[in-house]
Image (cartoon, rainbow, N blue to C red):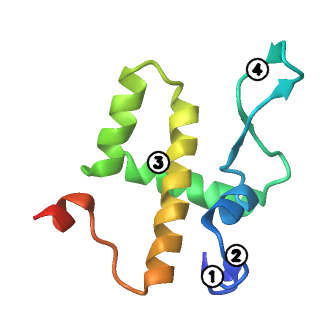
């Protein structure tokens, strides 16, 4: 991530980084009558997308917030690849937040207690 983002200086917004990595969904709309599923851009950096996908696969295998999120969404009927994309997007946003605040990551449960 440090190489792709230039030590997190190339992107000032996590949405821009998510779009560059091919994780940001874009709505498919044509006028008012034709609507389809949201899709991600095919012009993404494929190496970065692959690395984030592998990180997402690992994140949903270990106990934690992302595994619970993945299982909850799949049980609700979402497609697995769509949920993996959401997990990749969450990872990008969390990385950007950590680098912006310059503090270690803390989970939601640790902040409440």
Q: Secondary structure at mark 1?
A: loop
Q: Most extreme residue toward the right, as rendered?
A: 31
In the rendered structure, which disc, 2 or 3, sits on the residue that comes first in sequence? 2
* Residue on which the image places disc 4: 36
Of marks 4 and 1, the one in the foreground: 4
Q: Separation of disc 4 and disc 2 at Cα?
A: 30 Å
Q: Separation of disc 3 and disc 1 at Cα?
A: 23 Å
Q: Disc 1, disc 2: CB below 8 Å?
A: yes
In the rendered structure, which disc, 4 or 1, sits on the residue that comes first in sequence? 1
In the rendered structure, which disc, 3 or 1, sits on the residue that comes first in sequence? 1
Residue 113: % across, % down: 10, 64
* Residue on which the image places disc 2: 11
Q: Separation of disc 1 and disc 2 at Cα?
A: 6 Å
Q: Separation of disc 2 and disc 3 at Cα?
A: 24 Å
* Residue on which the image places disc 3: 57
Q: Nearer the viewer, residue 47 or 41?
A: 41
User: Residue at left 89%, top 23%?
Assistant: 30
Q: Secondary structure at mark 4?
A: loop
User: Residue at left 46%, top 65%?
Assistant: 94
């Amino acid at each position: 991530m440090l190489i792709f983002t230039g030590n997190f200086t190339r992107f000032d917004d996590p949405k821009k980084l998510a779009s560059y990595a091919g994780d940001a969904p874009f709505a498919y709309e044509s006028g008012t009558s034709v609507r389809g599923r949201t899709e991600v851009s095919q012009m993404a950096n494929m190496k970065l997308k692959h690395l984030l996908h592998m990180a997402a696969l690992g994140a949903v295998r270990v106990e934690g917030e992302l595994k619970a999120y993945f299982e909850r969404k799949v049980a609700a009927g979402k497609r697995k690849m769509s949920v993996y994309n959401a997990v990749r997007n969450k990872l990008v946003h969390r990385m950007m937040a950590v680098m912006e605040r310059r503090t270690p990551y803390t989970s939601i449960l640790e902040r409440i207690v």
